[in-house]
Image (spheres, helix red, strand yellow):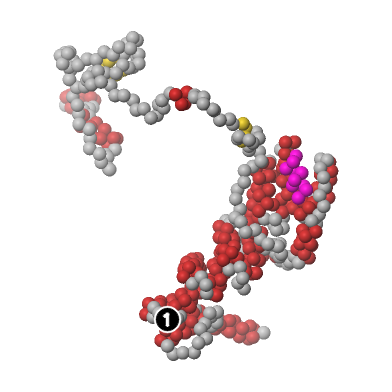
Amino acid sequence: MSVRFRYVIALAAVAGLLSSCGIRRKKYENPISKETQQPDKVLFDKAVNDIERSRYEIARLTLQTLINTYDTSEYLAKAKLAIADSWYREGGSHGLAQAEAEYKDFILFYPTMEEAAEAQNKVCDIHYKQMEKADRDPMHAFRAEDECRQLLVQFPNSKFAPDAQQKLRNIQEVLAEHEFRAGYFYHTKGSHPAAANRLQGVADQFPLYSGADEALWLVSDSYQKMGDRFDDKRAAALARIVKDYPLSSHVDEAKDALKAMNRPIPDADPVAYARMKYELENRQKAGVMSHFWGAFRKNPDTRLAAKSGSPQMETMHPTVPASVPQTALTGGTGDVGATVLNGEKSALDTLPDARSTPPTPAAAGTPAAAPAGQVTATTPGTATQTPAGGATTATDSTTNPSAPAASASPAPLPTNHPMPQTKQKKKKDKKKKPEVKNSATDSKQQNQ
């Protein structure tokens, strides 16, 4: 057994060494089947061979040579797509960013080619593979949603459209879970207006979300705790559970609540019933160790995502909470009223705006009056106090010769390295410090 185990280890090491050296070959998806010995075709085949053997930098140099040398070649589009594919195969954050930019350029220059839909599908995959769990940063989920939606809009008849539609359902499951966690946090915290707003947005934007019925149930609970004023909104959430999610575990409770509120109980929608039944029957079950390995997995778990139905094709926009007062303009009703003044002028219309009128400067040679008790500086070296009457007295060296003239010392020049004040004081103290003699030593010397 030990010999066989060593043999397996040796084979694995050799396989890893060969793959790292580029000997392991992975076939390229978009080759050119035309057999010719034209120089541009030879360059393209050489680049494809390098891509298949993971020599991506050499392949890109060869393809760039083809593009720069043979600018009228029939293989220019294929060469540009091969450059993007080489970045995509290389991977990494830098490689995927470069691949996305190259794919976008290819779609811009060649939108009618069959490979344009494939390029858009690769852009969707770039962000889909980097998508993280619902409790983490949803940046790549938002980007993947936009790119997959763009594929369905721009290339609706492409062979990649069904796969992109399922990816969009998976992405929206993750985004809905992200919003649901935020709403559930607000509900647990007791912030019911915020919880109702978030959870109502989840149910409205992502009706295919596996927890949409739970979100609506929490919405009804939040509106109930917000007071009788929101009974209509609570009844609408309960009625939606009964109608659109007839197989939910909250259907019986929702019917009882509607009956207690004396509200009509709607019938279940047969289309919604069939869709929900299909989802429950085709839902993938979790493995025994799925919860254990899920803690170490970066990508989200999309087993509960819908397998049927049309995904949402509009971007989610934040809504205004129902607790915010509504304004009532002309012809409307609301919590806050507003009227328009007809011909009446207020002080804002008649009086000038103080901000638009700068203060008028005082006349030359006439000092402005200062408040009573304020010390005002006049000519150099003098300062006077304003009497209670408001008159300002000023003294000048010309009118009062006995007043000493102030010595105006020049201001120090600015510097980036000023000397600390403590060091300057220490230097001055050293110069001015008198010599202190010991009286006992002096008396002893005099006796001697």
Task: Tell me which corner region of the image, top left, top right, bottom left or bottom right, holds residue 1.
Answer: bottom right
Report the label total.
1
Q: 25 or 264: which is nearer to us?
A: 264
Asked if one can make out residue 53 in the rendered structure from this viewpoint, the answer is no
State the SS at label 1: loop
Measured from the top left, where is residue 30 in percent x and y? Answer: 53, 79
**Is 143 positioned to the left or the right of 36 in the image?**
right
**Up-down relation of residue 103 to residue 443 (above or below):** below
**Up-down relation of residue 108 to residue 11 (above or below):** above
Q: 313 or 250: which is nearer to us?
A: 313
Measured from the top left, where is residue 264 in percent x and y? Answer: 82, 45
**Up-down relation of residue 220 to residue 72 (above or below):** above
Measured from the top left, where is residue 136 in percent x and y? Answer: 59, 56
Q: 73 or 425: which is nearer to us?
A: 73
Measured from the top left, where is residue 397 in percent x and y? Answer: 17, 17
Q: Residue at x 77, y 60 (%)?
A: 271
Q: Amino acid at mark 1?
A: Ser
**Is 140 positioned to the left or the right of 101 in the image?**
right
Task: Tell me which corner region of the image, top left, top right, bottom left or bottom right, holds residue 445.
Answer: top left
Q: Residue at x 23, y 21 (%)?
A: 364
Q: Which residue is mark 1?
A: 73
Q: Residue at x 49, y 79 (%)?
A: 51
